[in-house]
Amino acid sequence: MLDLLDLQKHFILTHLKKGDIAVDFTMGNGHDTEFLSKTVGERGHVYAFDVQSLALESTEKHLKECGCPDNYTLILDSHHNVKKYVDKPIKAGMFNLGYLPGSDKTVTTMRETTLPAIEAAISLMDKDAIILVAVYPGHAEGEAEGKMVNEYLSSLSRYKVCCTQIKIVNSPTSPFFFIIESKP
């Protein structure tokens, strides 16, 4: 069976290289931050965002335990404020919408900040860059976010970005993701 996380990494690795800049827009427990950090290496940099201090603490601990290079900035702020912290073109960005794994699920990403965050991410994209947006439609806000992201991405010019959706079609509540690629 298809592993969506492995597939996401496959797509990221077609764009992201040593020395690049990447953003984890929803750091959670730091697994995507770790992947991005190890991929860009010591000469690259990763910015990671979350609104929960527990996510920052968990991520910082995880990155140290996994031996990541000191190439990351962990930011306690909403992902829609990315341009306050990142002023360089990015080669990759990752969004895992929903709630912090292992939490009480009371704090989730919200449409009000997700759309501006995705818009900002696209505006920061370098040439031949990629952004992945994972959606978890198993809860009401996740389903609404997925529809909103689909509508927004469908409206973008195919001459500027290529937007693809990867979804298990016979399992409507399973996670799925969007791939946004800038033109080379």
Image: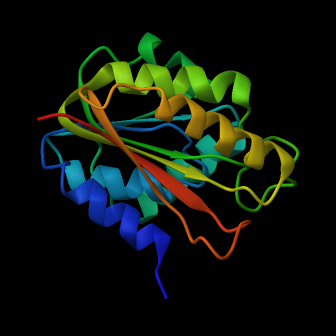
How many labels sit on residues? 0
Decide if residue 127 is on the left or right side of residue 56.
Answer: left
Residue 127 drawn at (x, y percent): 15, 30
Q: Nearer the viewer, residue 85 or 121?
A: 121
Rendered view: 31 above or below 116:
below
Residue 61 % position (x, y): 53, 55
Which sits in the foreground, 154 or 53?
A: 154
Observer-nearest residue: 167 or 55?
167
User: What residue lies at 48% left-to-right and 33% top-to-bottom?
Assistant: 153
- Left or right, 44 with respect to 4, comes to left
Image vertical order of residue 111 relative to residue 42, above or below: above
In the displayed structure, 163 sits above or below 168; it is above
Image quadrant containing the C terminus: top left
Q: Is residue 40 left or right of residue 130?
A: left
In percent of the image, x 71 and y 67: which residue is there?
A: 172
In which quarter of the view is residue 29 placed? bottom right
Residue at 33% across, 51% down = 36
Task: Tell me the residue at 35%/58% (across/down).
Answer: 35
* Residue 168 picture location, percent across and down: 57, 71
Name the colouring of the figure. rainbow
Quadrant of the image occupied by residue 66: bottom left
Q: Is residue 113 above or below residue 70?
A: above
